[in-house]
Image: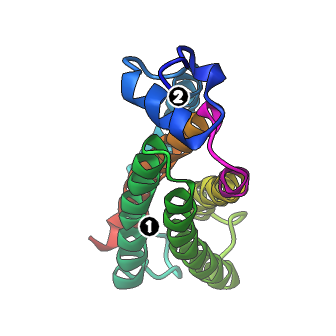
Amino acid sequence: MNDVTHSYEAESDVAVRAVARRRRAFPNGWWGMALLIATEATLFGTMIATYFFLRFQVVTWPPAGIEPPKVALPLALTGALVATSIPMFMAVRAARAGRPGGVTRWIALAVLVQGGYLATQIVLYLDDLSKFSPKDTSYGSIYFTLLMTHHIHVFIGILLNLWIALRVLGGLTAYRLTGVRAIALYWYFVNVAAVAVVLTQLSPSL
């Protein structure tokens, strides 16, 4: 496939592999995702800063009547989520090598763990809601807002994974390779954000 000189001409596994081997710069789709991540990092940074601003305005945090968060399960869940960076990285490698089967298998593994993480976190979130309300205290407000924002990002990432996996089932193209790389980048960010969020969430207990 040496006659394929532009990425948009790569519409087969072999051509995608050849173009990926010659590429020297990140594609525009990757840069677009990087720009989105920059805006989302600002969002998380603002909310985490708000959390600690509110924290240092009071003596008791969480307020009386609200138990400090438990540490073990959130840390274990976050560790599992962060570990999905590995199958996402492997999916990118498989895509660059022109192996669509490998892409879908690695993404399926990632989605399995990510879905389990999100389902467990929703259960914990609802359990917390049964104990205290986001309307009653500043702690409850920022606590639930921060966690919900993170969970929404995980849910969006799972949808992106499912979408790109379905597209790759129809074969690899240069655009789908870019999609895999961009979505993997998104997940690297979500996993880093998960660490920041859980450390913030658990800070009263650490």
The picture places residue 90, in percent across and down from the top left corner, at: 39, 56
Identify the residue under disc 2. Answer: 30
C-alpha distance separating marks 1 and 2: 22 Å
The picture places residue 99, in percent across and down from the top left corner, at: 50, 53
Q: Can residue 69 be seen in this view?
A: yes
The picture places residue 103, in percent across and down from the top left corner, at: 52, 57
Q: What amino acid is labelled 2 in the image?
A: Trp
Identify the residue under disc 1. Answer: 81
Most foreground residue, 149 or 19: 19
Q: Is mark 1 on a helix, strand or loop?
A: helix
Most foreground residue, 89 or 94: 94
The magenta region covers: 164-176
Residue under the point 57% across and 21% down: 7
Is 173 magenta? The answer is: yes
Q: Is residue 198 visible?
A: no
Q: What amino acid is labelled 1 in the image?
A: Leu
Q: In this view, does 11 lie above or below 187?
A: above
Residue under the point 64% across and 60% down: 158
Q: Earlier in the sequence, mark 1 or mark 2?
A: 2
Q: What element carries label 2?
A: helix
